[in-house]
Amino acid sequence: MRAGALQRQTQFLLLAALAAGMGYFGGLRPLKERIRSDQATVTNLWFRLSASNRALALPGGLTPENFQEQSALWEKRLAACRAAEKEIRDRLRIPEPVARRLRKPFFLIDFQTERQALAESLAAFAKKQGQAFSPGATNGLPVFTGEESDPRRLWLRLFFSEQLLRAAAWAKVGAVQTLQQLPAIESAAPFGRAAVELPMYLETRGDFDRLLDLIHALPRSGAALGESAGAAGLTNKPALFLRRLFVAKSSPTNPGEVRAQLTVSGIFLPKSRPGKEARVR
């Protein structure tokens, strides 16, 4: 009996060992190799993810921890940009009568009549201010040449020229000798529309301090200049921008008298994209 029991026990142990071996080689060992392979894949993906995070790191130190704080900061900056955009548009706003003319067909006879009346009005205003407008000043008001891609812009040039000459007489710069229209400049505006810049060349001769008054007045609106500017017809004056300035002494006996050459631009920001080219009627 003992020999039979010992034999069965031995067989059972052998069968158990055989089953364990078969389980290891048939199941555990392949699973171990698969785990090693998957671990290598996961490790490779982890390194790639880390490298991608370093390469595509968000600017400004933005992290998941400070996202809310940074988001509030960017909202504040966006509000400041929108406020600046509104201020810029307010300072560049064109009076409604001029804007209305830009929307209507261009009639040459109307423009020529308005130009002649404006030249006489400016000359009378300069005389009232004790200033001298040479023929080259009022003759420099824009004229129709037939080369304009959109003749309606002549109304803009006429408006900017009027405001520049009125500002010069208001500042009492002395003698305004020359006004000349320069080629238009078109560039992309920060508000999604093409900005139209219309430069003008102005040459004056007079007191240096009065020239400084004109330079200080150029970027300011008529409302910002006060009541005296309103009396000078600058109530609707938009901001004008000084592009170039050349100043030289004009008299050896009067050190305060200078000859100045200025390039001044008026800028127009259309509310919508321009349509078809206007025809002259």
Image (cartoon, rainbow, N blue to C red):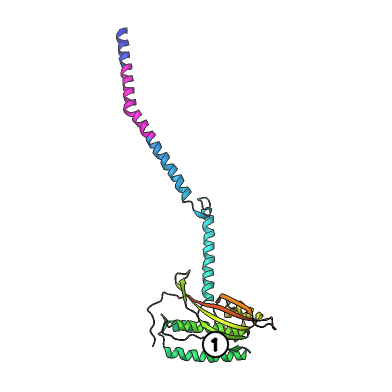
Residue 234 part of the magenta-drawn span: no
Q: Quadrant of residue 69?
A: bottom right
Residue 6 horizontal side relative to residue 272, left or right: left
Task: Give me the residue at 35% from left, 31% from top.
Answer: 31
Q: Quadrant of residue 20?
A: top left
- Give coordinates of residue 193: x percent, y percent: 44, 72
Residue 215: percent from the left, percent from the top?
60, 77
One can see residue 72 in this view: yes
Q: In this rendered view, identify the residue nearer to me: 218 or 9.
A: 218
x and y percentages locating residue 253 in the rendered image: 70, 84
Residue 22 colored in magenta in the image:
yes
The reply to whether residue 96 is in sight is no
Query: Residue at image x 32%, y 13%?
Result: 10
In the image, which residues are magenta?
13-36
Q: Image height check: is 192 above or below 69?
A: below
Q: Which residue is mark 1?
A: 136
Q: Is residue 35 above or below residue 214?
A: above
Crowd band around label 1 with a 10 angstrom C-alpha radius: few (<14), some (14–19), many (20+): some
Foreground pick, 140 / 122:
140
What secondary structure is marked by label 1? helix
Q: Assign the C terminus to one quadrant of the image.
A: bottom left
Closer to the camera, 7 or 23? 23
